Each structure stands twice: as C-alpha cells, then as structure tokens.
Amino acid sequence: MNRTLIRMIGVESRAALGAPVRLSNLRQRLPGISKTDFEQDVLDLVKSKKYFLIRHFFPESLTDQEKEMMISAGEDNFYYKIDRCSGTKPKSSRPGRPLISELLRRELFGRSIRLPKWIIEWLRAEGNAGKKIEVALIEHYGLIAPPAGTTP
C-alpha cells in the first residue's frame, strides 16, 4: 500500500508545488482502506525518514469528524499533513526560469553593480576593473570622453 500512498501524495496538486498534503485529502482518495491500515501505512512512510508529519496547531478548533480524518498524536494532538523531508522533493515540473551555472549567477560588484560571477573573477584577476569597464563601454557604444579638466 505504501506505493499507492506515495503515488497519491504525488498526485495531490499541492504536492506538485512542494506543499504538504492534507491527510484528509489522501483518506478521501483512498476510500477502500480502513483507518487503521491507512494510519499504519502513513506511519511506515514516516519511519522511512523520507516523510514527516505535521501537527495541527489548534486542535481545540476541530470537530470530531475532522479529528477522525487525522492521525492521533496523543493528548488531544493530531497530525493533519504529511510532507517529504528536505532533499527528497522532486524537481518542480512547473515552467519557469531554468537553473543556471554558479558562474553565471550575478553577484554584487562594488556597491550597486551586479555582474556574473565569472566576469567579477576576471576583473579582480586583471586588476584596475574600473578602467577596463570604462574602456569597454567607450569602445562598444562609441562614446567620447569629455576633455580632461572640464567641470560638469
């Protein structure tokens, strides 16, 4: 049953986004399983150390029917969600910005300029970064520097 339960956790739409899954939603999707078997299967997943349970923060607000859909944690405490442990979450299949190399990530250079890490490393190795940037901008954009000694 654990395979079915793991598959159902993955099917939950919120699980695909990386959010914990409500145990009540899982129980509703598995109507043929008894409460005892369901709880044992969930606890087996937790023992595998790939999943963990989340306690309800305000169990006094729950009805008896809501408590029945959860797993008792003793002394009027209840687990109501299950989540994968960090490092075991699948990569998101959502569209978005692709992962980039560490060297392509932008870092702060100076006080307000963000440049890719590889350029920062090159500028620091070459020395006189300000002059190199100035020359490159003049060449690329065809800028003309004002004559020396002029005031703004």
Image: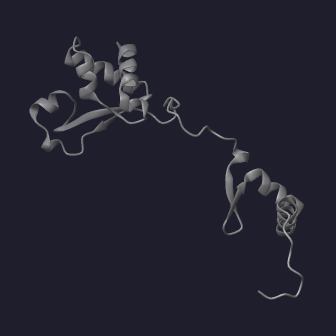
Indicate the position of residue 82 as horizontal and vertical percent values: 34, 31
Task: Identify whether 97 is placed above or below 65.
Answer: below
Identity of the residue drawn at 24% across and 40% down: 56
Residue in front for this viewpoint, 20 or 36: 20
Q: Is 117 left or right of 147, judged from the image as shown?
A: left
Identity of the residue drawn at 83% across and 65% down: 129
Identity of the residue drawn at 16% across and 32% down: 67
Q: Is 48 left or right of 42, judged from the image as shown?
A: right
Quadrant showing the C terminus: bottom right
Identity of the residue drawn at 68% across and 57% down: 107
Residue in front for this viewpoint, 79 or 134: 134
Residue 119 sits in which quadrant?
bottom right
Indicate the position of residue 114 as horizontal and vertical percent values: 68, 59
Indicate the position of residue 65 as horizontal and vertical percent values: 11, 29
Task: Identify whether 50 is placed above or below 104.
Answer: above
Quadrant showing the N terminus: top left
Indicate the position of residue 31 as horizontal and vertical percent values: 22, 14
Q: Residue furthest left?
A: 64
Q: How many marks?
A: 0
Residue 49 sits in which quadrant?
top left
Task: Identify whether 5 is placed above or below 116.
Answer: above
Looking at the image, what colour scheme do you see? one colour
Residue in front for this viewpoint, 72 or 107: 107
